[in-house]
């Protein structure tokens, strides 16, 4: 059978039971016609067969994942990580370093507190066994809005979800002592004077705060 397309001269990851790596793959219509050595498969070429020299590049099968945590994995390259922080000072040092590199007024939005992939044991993994407050974040970022994202509860199936904002972020979001939670199960923590501490606590598996109260913060949705 003549092939319509032959990719040759590469590394074809077959993902068969033996996990073979071939040099070439031949396609006929919408089917894989053959996988093997380049010379063997090029022999299947017809005059109108398209030939693509991979020049050592890899080919992998198309993947369909119906339960992909694309936000958790993809955002690792977008939102800075706080993994490994073991105290509030550690967290503040990370934020301060990000502020020093950011243009004036730019949002600093990080991944959740804790260690990926499941972010367990927060805030118990911090020496102070509590979350930082907006006032503490303000010490290292008085002008840049800072938002430490909550996890998606389905990542670890443990509640609550907690996110933290500094004063600049609260101002941009329009959050004051008079702001009411948008839903039951969402708490805007307040200090003894009735002012927001910057800590949001959610008894829900979907982080509603970042989609509502903190919608001003850059996010992937």
Image (cartoon, rainbow, N blue to C red):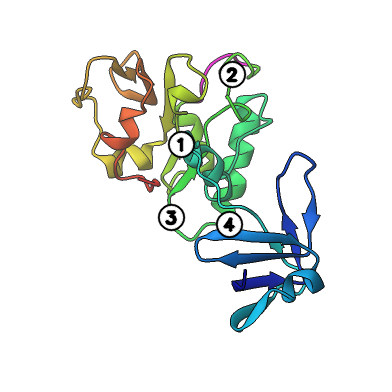
Q: CA distance from mark 1 to mark 4?
A: 37 Å
Q: Which residue is mark 1?
A: 66
The residues tagged by marks 3 and 4 sit, at their Cα atoms, a distance apart of: 10 Å
Q: Earlier in the sequence, mark 1 or mark 3?
A: 1
Q: Nearer the viewer, mark 1 or mark 4?
A: 1
The segment highlighted magenta reads 128-132
Q: From the viewer's perspective, is 57 left or right of 62?
A: right
Find residue 32 and report its horizontal and vertical position in percent: 60, 58
In the rendered structure, find residue 120 and report the number of the disc placed on it.
2
Label 2 crowd (10 A; few <14 / some 14-19 / many >=20): some
Q: CA distance from mark 2 to mark 4?
A: 29 Å
The mark closer to the camera, 1 or 2, is 1
Whichever of labels 2 and 4 marks the residue nearer the N terminus, that label is 4
Quadrant containing the C terminus in the rendered view: top left
82 left or right, relative to 143: right
Residue at (19%, 23%) from the top-left corner? Answer: 180
Q: Earlier in the sequence, mark 3 or mark 2?
A: 3
Determine the residue positioned at 60% across, 33% down. Answer: 91
């Amino acid at each position: 059978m003549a092939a319509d397309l032959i990719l040759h001269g590469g590394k074809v990851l077959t993902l068969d039971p033996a996990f073979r790596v071939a040099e070439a793959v031949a396609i006929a219509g919408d089917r894989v016609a053959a996988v093997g050595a380049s010379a063997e498969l090029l022999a299947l070429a017809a005059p109108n067969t398209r030939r693509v020299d991979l020049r050592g590049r890899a080919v992998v099968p198309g993947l369909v994942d119906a339960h992909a945590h694309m936000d958790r994995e993809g955002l690792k390259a977008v939102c800075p990580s706080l993994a490994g922080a073991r105290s509030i000072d550690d967290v503040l040092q990370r934020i301060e370093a990000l502020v020093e590199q950011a243009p004036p007024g730019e949002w600093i939005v990080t991944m959740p507190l804790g260690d990926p992939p499941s972010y367990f044991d927060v805030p118990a993994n911090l020496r102070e066994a509590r979350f930082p407050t907006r006032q503490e974040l303000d010490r290292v970022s008085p002008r840049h809005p800072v938002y430490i994202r909550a996890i998606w509860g389905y990542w670890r199936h443990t509640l609550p979800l907690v996110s933290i904002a500094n004063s600049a972020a609260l101002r941009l979001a329009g959050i004051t002592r008079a702001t009411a939670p948008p839903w039951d199960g969402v708490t805007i923590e307040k200090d003894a004077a009735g002012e927001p501490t910057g800590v949001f606590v959610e008894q829900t598996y979907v982080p509603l705060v970042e989609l509502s109260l903190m919608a001003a913060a850059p996010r992937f949705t």
